[in-house]
Amino acid sequence: MIFKVATIFALVAVVSADHHHAFSSQHVHKHDGHHEVVSHGHGHHHDYYTHPKYHFEYKIEDPHTGDHKSQHEERDGDVVKGYYELKEPDGLIRHVHYHADKHSGFHADVKHSIHHVVPKHHHH
């Protein structure tokens, strides 16, 4: 799944590159640990389990389309932590910090802020 997401953002980066001043970046790092044997029942069947661990992030800034967003996420076993930010059509910026694990489920803290643009004054 993570590699599908990375592929999609890589395509967005290529499309965004056609616009002047657009910026896109992404980074994916998957940690492949040693597999562990998990026995089922009478030892007739074995599954191989690798501890899931990854880290990814991306950022897109395209002034032509107004698309501004970024995300950072990491997973270590059953614990996923992340943050994303995006500029909504009304100009508000949504900030979301989230955390998920098998004991407490998914939790997100959502906040909004306004990005003020200060115009530059040109003196002649």
Image (cartoon, rainbow, N blue to C red):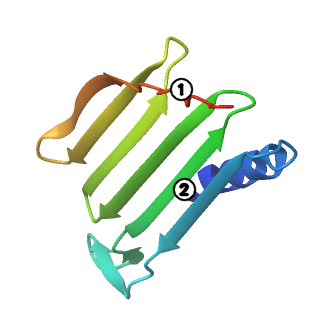
Q: How many marks?
A: 2
Hey, which residue is sitting farthest front in the picture?
Answer: 124
How crowded is the residue under tag 2: few (<14 C-alpha within 10 Å), some, or many (20+)?
few
- Mark 1 falls on what kind of element? loop
Residue at 33% across, 61% down: 75
Residue at 38% across, 54% down: 73
Q: Position of residue 122 (x, y in %)?
A: 63, 31
Instruction: Tell us which disc is closer to us: 2 or 1.
Output: 1
Q: Is residue 49 above or below residue 116?
A: below
- 13 with respect to 86 (left or right): right
The C terminus, quarter of image:
top right
Q: Position of residue 94 (x, y in %)?
A: 38, 27
Q: Which mark is residue 2?
A: 2
- 32 with respect to 39 (left or right): right
Q: Position of residue 37 (x, y in %)?
A: 33, 82
Hey, which residue is sitting farthest top in the picture?
Answer: 90
Amino acid at the residue labelled 2: Ile
Q: Earlier in the sequence, mark 2 or mark 1?
A: 2
Q: Nearer the viewer, residue 64 or 55?
A: 64
Amino acid at the residue labelled 1: Pro
Q: Position of residue 77 (x, y in %)?
A: 27, 65
> In the picture, residue 2 is in which quadrant?
bottom right
Hey, which residue is sitting farthest right in the picture?
Answer: 18
- Mark 2 falls on what kind of element? helix
Q: Nearer the viewer, residue 95 or 98?
A: 95
- 6 with respect to 118 (left or right): right
Q: CA distance from mark 2 to mark 1?
A: 40 Å
Q: Is residue 34 above or below residue 54?
A: below
> Which residue, given by chain and number where applicable, does mark 1 sit on?
119
Q: Nearer the viewer, residue 81 or 118?
A: 118
Q: Is residue 92 above or below residue 76?
A: above
Residue at 19% across, 38% down: 105
